[in-house]
Amino acid sequence: MVESKACALLRTLAATGSLAPLPEDASATELAEVARDQGLVGLLLAAIERDGSAWAAPIAEGLAARRRADLVRTLGQIGLGTRVLALLEARGIRGLPLKGAVLAETVCDVESDRPMSDVDVLALERWPEAKAALREAGFAEVARGDHAWAFRDPDGNGVLELHRSVVSAPGLFPLDAEGLWARSRQGRGQLPRLPSPEDLLVQLALHAAFQHGLVLSLVQWLDFRRVLEREAVDPSCLLALAAAARAEVPLAAALLVAEAVVDAPVPVRAPLPEGLRRWLEPRLAAPLSFIAPSPPALARARWELCAGRRTELLWRTLVLPETPEGDESLPARVAFAFGRALRLALGSPPPAPSLAAHDLGEPPAAAAGAEVPFGEELLRDCLASFRHVRLSVTGHCMEPALRHGERVHLVGAARRPPRLGDVVLARQKEGLRLHRLVWGPPLAPSGSPWRTKADRGRRLDPPLAAEDVLASVEVVEARPWESPRRAGRALLSLAGGIAARLRSGGGAEASP
Amino acid sequence: MVGRTIGAGYVLVPLVDRGADLDSTLSLTRVAAFIWEQLDGMRTGAAVVDAVVERFDVERPRAEADYLELVETLLGLKAIVPVSPRGR
C-alpha cells in the first residue's frame, strides 16, 4: 500500500472515528508503520480492538507494544517538563509547559495518545537565567534556535526545548507573559500549571501555521479537535487573545485546515488575507497535503500569513534578540542579520551550531580511565545483543539527512562494518555523536585513523580509531525507503572540511 | 521488555521489531530489579514479597509497598499481565 493510502485511511479514522476496511492491495504492517509515524498508534489500536477486524489481528500485538513504549516515554517526558518547571521556580522564574505535554495530560485518554519528540517549556521571564539554571543542573545543550534552545536531560528522559517565544522570529507575535500566567490553571497530573485552553489553541495555531507552514502530523492536527471538543473554550476570549498576540490570521488558517484534515469543530471564523485565501483554497480540497511528510511551503506560508506585516517579518526573522552565541549587543546582532540575509539570499544552509548537536550521552567526567557513562554502556550492550537499537535524533547538524526528533535504527559495527558515507555513531572527546563517516573503509588504509563530520558542520571532527565507531544508521523510520548512506556526499564533505582547515591556517591537520 | 544489568544499575528495555528501543527505557532500583526478576508467572505476590524480605532484610510492610508500587507501574505500562491461578 502506498503511504498516501495508509495516511488517507488514518485521516478518516482521526476525522470520523471509523476505521475503513483495508483495501485488497494493502498491507496492515505498512498501515501500522504510518500510524506510528503519525502518532496515531493508540487511536488505531482502539479502533481495531473495537471493530475486531480480522485483517488487523497480526499488527495488534505490535501496536500494543508500541503504545506501551509510548506511555513509558511520554510519562518520562512529562516528568522531565515538571522537573524543569520546578528548577525554574526554585530560581523565581515563572514557566509554563507548551503543546504536547499539556495535551497529553489534559485532552488525551492516556498519555501515550500524544507521543512527542521532545518536551517544550516556555520561560516567561529572565531568559538568560533560565538557560543558566538548566546548565547548572547538568543539562547538556544540544541545539539553539531563534525561539528555543534544546537541552538533553542528564537523567535520560530525552530532550527539553526551553522556549523564549512560541515560534521563530521572537516578537512578531507578542507574548503577554503576565496574561499567560494570570490565565494559567492548576494541572491535573504531574505538571503543576497549564496554559488556559484559549492560550493553548493560539499557541498550537502559531506553531502549525507559522512554524510548520500548515504541515503537521495527524496527531498534531487532532490536537485541535481534542482541545475544541474536550475543553471549555470561550470563542470571544480566544479571538481577543489571538488579537493581542497579533495571531488572528494564523489562528483562522490553522482552524480552517484542522477542520479540513480532522473535522475539528471550528468555534470562530475570521477573514483571511486575499493571498492566503487563494493559496489555501485549492489545498483544502486535498487535505493530505497538510500532513507530514508532505513538504511545507514554509516561506510562502509565512509570507501570506504576514500580509501587511512583511517588513516586520523580515526584520524579526533577521535581527534576533541575541546572536546564537548569546551576544545581545546591537552590532553583533546586525552583523549576524547581514550574514543570515546573505545565506537566505544564496539559499545556503545556516552554519552548524557551535556545540555538536547530536549529543547522545554525557561526555566522560574525566580523561583516560574514566568510567563509561551509563547511557553509553547500555547502548553498547544493546548493540551487541540485539539486531538493532532504536533511538531519537537530537539536534539539527545532520539535516536534511537526519532531522531533529526522527527515530533511527542503529546497527552495531560488529554486525555491519561501517563504510565511507554511512552516518555513524562515534565516540568523540565531547561524547557520542551521529555524524557522517567521510574518511574510512574502503578508502582508508587499514589501521589509519577515520574521520567524521556533521553534514552542516564546516570542520572535520578530530581523527578517531575504528573502535570508536560504535554503530551506523541503517534506517530512518520516517523514510525507510531512503538509504542514509551517501558516499559522494561524504567525499564532498571531506573536501569542504579540508578546505576549511586550510583557510583557517590548520594545514598541518588537513590530510585525512 | 527485557531487563539488562548495566554496571551497578538495572534497566528495562522495550523490544520493538527485534530491536531495542532506547527511547523508552525504565531504570529500576535494586529492589525493583529483584522483584522484576521474580515475576515469572508462577510465584504468587506473597511469595515475591517473602523473597524480598529475605533478600533485603526489610520489614514486610515496606516490602509489600515496594512490590505493589512496582506491579502497579508495570501493569500501567502493560509490561506485565495478571495470570489467574488456573492459568498458571
Image (spheres, rainbow, N blue to C red):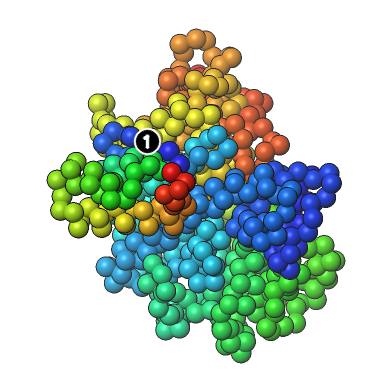
- Evaluate whether residue B1 shows in this view: yes
- Evaluate whether residue A249 shows in this view: no
Q: What percent of the width, then of the height, locates residue A329?
A: 42, 61
Q: Residue at x 80, y 76 (%)?
A: A274
The image shows residue A37, relative to residue A283, as above or below, that is: above
Badge 1: chain ID: B
Q: What percent of the width, then of the height, locates residue A328?
A: 42, 62
The residue nearer to you, when weighing A277 against A156, is A156
**Would residue A444 be found to the left or right of residue A432 on screen?**
right
Residue at the bottom extreme of this rendering? A236
Q: What percent of the width, then of the height, locates residue A18?
A: 74, 64
- Amino acid type of the residue that numbered disc 1 sits on in the rendered structure: Arg
Q: Residue at x 25, y 34 (%)?
A: A366
Instruction: Point out the image quarter for the N terminus of chain A.
Output: top right
Q: Residue at x 22, y 52 (%)?
A: B63
Q: Residue at x 59, y 41 (%)?
A: A402
Q: Residues within 10 Å of mark 1 (few under 14, many from 20)?
A: some
The image shows residue A28, relative to residue A87, as above or below, that is: above
The image shows residue A320, relative to residue B53, as above or below, that is: below
Element assignment for label 1: strand
The residue nearer to you, when weighing B46 against A213, is B46
Residue beneath label 1, please?
Answer: B4
